[in-house]
Amino acid sequence: MDVKFKVLEWDKLTRDQLHACIKLRIDVFVVEQNCPYPDLDGKDLDSIHVFVDEIDSEFSNGSYTDAYLRICKPGVSYDEPSIGRVATSERSRGTGLGVKLMEKGIEVCEDLWPGIGIRISAQKYLVKFYRDLGFEICSEPYLEDDIPHVQMYRK
């Protein structure tokens, strides 16, 4: 699978790209997970947004994306860069797109902040997914928006 990702800061997103990214986040985190919470938390403005944005790709039609994540710069969420809001659409799950998305996010972090490591707040049911990408649990379980989470770290 050859997927091309866009990597953009907030002020470089087009109106359509912003809509596609926010729509996927709301579809996954608010609607699918039945978790009404304020998705727009103020961190987007100082973050890097990674998503599929190829009009001819099977994973995007130009106004909707099937994969998205947000990279918070060091100091925004943690001392280290942080990957969060990792979302893939229902139709793209099981295709390997989520792994490719995370690999791209890790690559961006390592290019911009070499040697610092990456911290994430992972939903507990996804621990194996993140372990397979080199993350290790570094906290006790906790609830975030009534969903069990753990912090994980990758050197």
Image (cartoon, rainbow, N blue to C red):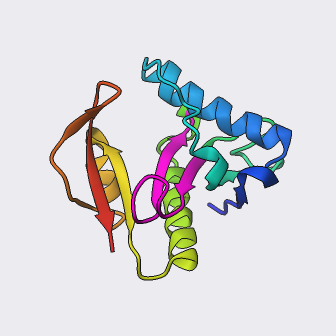
Judging depth in this view, the residue of 135 and 82 nearest the camera is 82
Q: Is residue 56 magenta?
A: no
Q: Is residue 85 magenta?
A: yes
Judging depth in this view, the residue of 65 and 50 nearest the camera is 50
Asked whether residue 100 is in view, the answer is yes
How many discs appear? 0
Judging depth in this view, the residue of 97 and 50 nearest the camera is 50
Asked whether residue 64 is in view, the answer is no
User: Is residue 117 toward the left or the right of residue 98 in the image?
Assistant: left
Point out residue 75 in the picture as x, y percentages from the top left corner: 47, 60
Which residue: 19% across, 52% down? 139
Q: Residue furthest bottom?
A: 115
Point out residue 109 in the picture as x, y percentages from the top left corner: 52, 70
Which residue: 49% across, 29% down? 29
Q: Quarter of the image for the N terminus: give it.
A: bottom right
Q: Quadrant of residue 43?
A: top right
Which residue: 37% across, 60% down? 119
Q: Quarter of the image for the C terminus: give it.
A: bottom left
Q: Residue furthest front?
A: 75
User: Is residue 147 toward the left or the right of residue 109 in the image?
Assistant: left
Judging depth in this view, the residue of 85 and 99 nearest the camera is 85
Point out residue 84 in the picture as x, y percentages from the top left corner: 47, 48
User: Is residue 45 toward the left or the right of residue 145 in the image?
Assistant: right
User: Is residue 127 toward the left or the right of residue 64 in the image?
Assistant: left
In this picture, which residue range is highlighted in magenta?
68-89
